[in-house]
Amino acid sequence: MPSPVLKAGSRPPWVGLGAAVWVQIAAGNAYNFPLYSPLLKSVLGYNQMQLTILGVANDIGESVALLPGIACNKFPPWAVLLVGCVLCFFGYGVLWLAVSETVSSMPYILLFITILIATNSNAWFGTAVLVTNMRNFPLSRGTVAGILKGYIGISAAVYTVVYSLVLKESALNLLMFLALGLPVLCLALMYFVRPCTPASGEESSEHGHFLFTQVFSVVLAIYLLIITVVNQMISLSHAVAYILIAIVVLLLLSPLAIPLKMTLFPVRARIDSSDQLAPPEGDATQTDPLLTPSPSGTNLVRFHEADDFSDLETLLAIGEGAVKEKRRPKRGEDFNFQEAFIKADFWLLWFVYFLGVGSGVTVLNNLSQIGVALGSDDTTILLSLFSFCNFGGRLGSGVVSEHFVKKNTLPRTFWMTCAHILMILSFILYASDLSGTLYVATTLLGICYGVQYSMMVPTVSELFGLKHFGINYGFMLIGNPIGAVLFSVLLAGNLYDAEAAKQGTSTCVGADCFRITFLVLAGVCGLGTVLSIILTVRVRPVYQMLYAGGSFRLPSSAIH
């Protein structure tokens, strides 16, 4: 007899979400490039252009997620995480060998490939936990995406605090930590990230559990921001530093309080409670309320059931002398990559995401230079502000979009439209160089950058299904490195160097260093606004069908 599985709301899915928080921190290791890149420049003797190209390898590595997406449909989550551990160990291990001069005269192309491999571990870590948890909590996709993407956004601040307080600003120690610490962490957690059968309906306690996780993530973000500022102002002793880090660890452990509470204080639920064990398939009866069909279908249908049913129909048709052609999926159902690739909405979403994230990453990659050019004395505060607002945009958009999609069936792409409009405003503020606008523009841009990331994830799953979500999501991420190359390297980099040459120095100062770049990016976001409006109008009927009852429902055609 097959062993029973537990439904969403029971302890394993919440343990998996708590473990995913730590894996997502590990999946943000690419944010460390600005911390160790000066060591690459000084020890290996690279110039600024060579360092910029290595930065592109950093962006490409973290965003190429097609293979992890395919692997998520072929292998269990622990296997996908294991690949990420191997890439992380070898990638950062070789980097450590290079900068510690244990291995001398390492070819530049080999270092490029090494960084590519090291940061590609992000894609394997992030895709494994995101796909698994989206499938475990299909009724709260925006909330789950906001939480998990939010922790990736905040990981930069976590690494900065660890780098400053524990590693004593040693880039060599940081690379050793990345090569050994992150793989060990993910190996210890891989067992807890596992798929569970999703529940048929929303539970009264689920909203409270998600709210608890969100509140403590905000507390963590604020705490990290305070530590960063305080550490810049005063020198902290070793004892105080370790106490502060211990508090960070406790805050990162806070999501595990949910399954702990459910273990110590179990709810005496009815038979249909989602805390009960799901019976084996052969033992289910028609009296089981979880199996009662609804007019719009149910979320208990497995991801492979529709295909199995189609195969059965085909076999019966063959027996009757007529083969029935398999029906193409409709929006809201499960699309494989080939089917999604030829859909207009797929490409509209890709371009909306690419234009938003590509313009945002341009500012992120050049934020230190932008701060210096516009007269900021401390670019560390600027980077911390962007990181905090990026986190807020990711987490907040998940909460807000989840509310309005259930209450008003408002497509999540509406919030991508709003983000594009605010990004236009932020770029105009940057270009104007008015007094006090630098921090306002950075705040707006950080929030909007986070919104673009967070809204893309559930939108892909809602329009094209969860069965092949991994590879469809992985293809969307390709927009990140393409945007970095086009807008950051070719546009911003060349214009900055040209203006610096006019000034006769390698460091450009003044609003003219980035003014043309900002105006071009404002136009890029204008195009993104138009495309996102078109996409929102096109997908509104899909959301009206999926959320007609106030919560997510699988389209009835998907279960027939």
Image: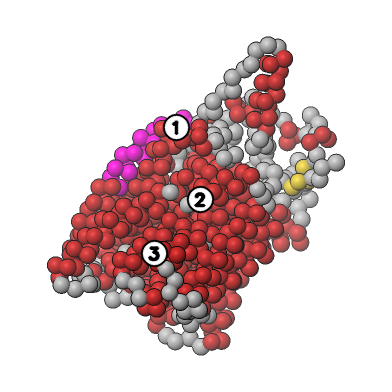
Q: Are marks 3 and 2 in contact (CB under 8 Å)?
A: no
Front residue (pair 236, 106): 106
Seen at 48% across and 79% down, the residue is 100
- The residue where tag 2 is placed is 65
Give the residue at mark 3: 54
Check if residue 540 falls in the magenta segment: yes
Residues in magenta?
525-542
What secondary structure is found at the residue carrying circle 2? loop
Dot 1: element: loop
Q: Which amino acid does the dot numbered 1 rest on?
A: Ile
Residue at image position (18%, 63%) is: 498
Using residue 490 as the reference point, say whether residue 107 is left or right of it. Answer: right
Q: Earlier in the sequence, mark 1 or mark 3?
A: 3
Q: Which mark is residue 342?
A: 1
Quarter containing the C terminus: top right
Neighbor class of circle 1 (other Cα within 10 Å; few <14, some 14-19, many 20+) is few
Where 161 sits versus 74, above or below?
below
Query: In the rendered image, is residue 44 in sight?
Result: yes
Q: Position of residue 195 (x, y in %)?
A: 67, 48
Give residue 219's position: percent from left, percent from top. Answer: 52, 66
The amino acid type, in three-letter code, at marker 2 is Ala
- Total of numbered circles in the picture? 3
Give the camera-side residue of 379 and 226.
379
Q: Kindly tell me whether residue 174 is visible in this rendering.
A: no
Gap between marks 1 and 3 measured at Cα: 34 Å
Q: Secondary structure at mark 3?
A: helix
**Disc with the residue nearer the chain's start (3 vs 2):** 3
